[in-house]
Amino acid sequence: MMPEEHASRKQQLEIFDRGLREFYAGHFPEARRIFEEISTVDPAAASYARKCSSLEASPPQEAWTGVWVMTEK
């Protein structure tokens, strides 16, 4: 990423970073809310928001390690 692009996306990147920290900590409702803030402009955030919703509906049975297996394209 070029410095100009980074500067223009700085706030979005900071929001995504906050979402990732909550996601890896296993705080799925908070992570989903954060990812949803930028989901319309960031496809990766939209994907994480959907995964958080899925994990909220069906929490991991084992200790959460942050690893998720992709089951669809």
Image: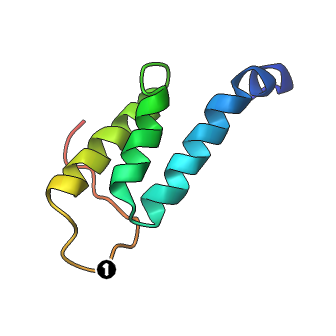
Which quarter of the figure is the C terminus placed in? top left
Q: Is residue 54 above or below residue 67?
A: above
- What kind of residue is marked 1? Ala
Which quarter of the picture shows residue 63? bottom left
Q: Name the side, left or right, on which 11 lies relative to 48.
A: right
Quarter holding residue 57: bottom left
Residue beneath disc 1: 63
Examine the rendered structure and indicate whether residue 49 appears above or below residue 66. above
Classify residue 38 as left or right of residue 30: right
Residue reaching furthest left? 58
The residue depicted at 62 percent of the width and 30 percent of the height is 12
Q: Is residue 43 left or right of residue 29?
A: right
Front in this rendered view, residue 33 or 26: 33
Q: Position of residue 6 (x, y in %)?
A: 76, 28
Q: Hey, which quadrant is residue 40 in on the image?
A: top left
Question: What residue do we see at 64% from left, 36% from top?
Answer: 13
32 or 71, nearer to the observer: 32
Q: Mark 1: few, some, or many residues within 10 Å (few <14, many ≥20)?
A: few
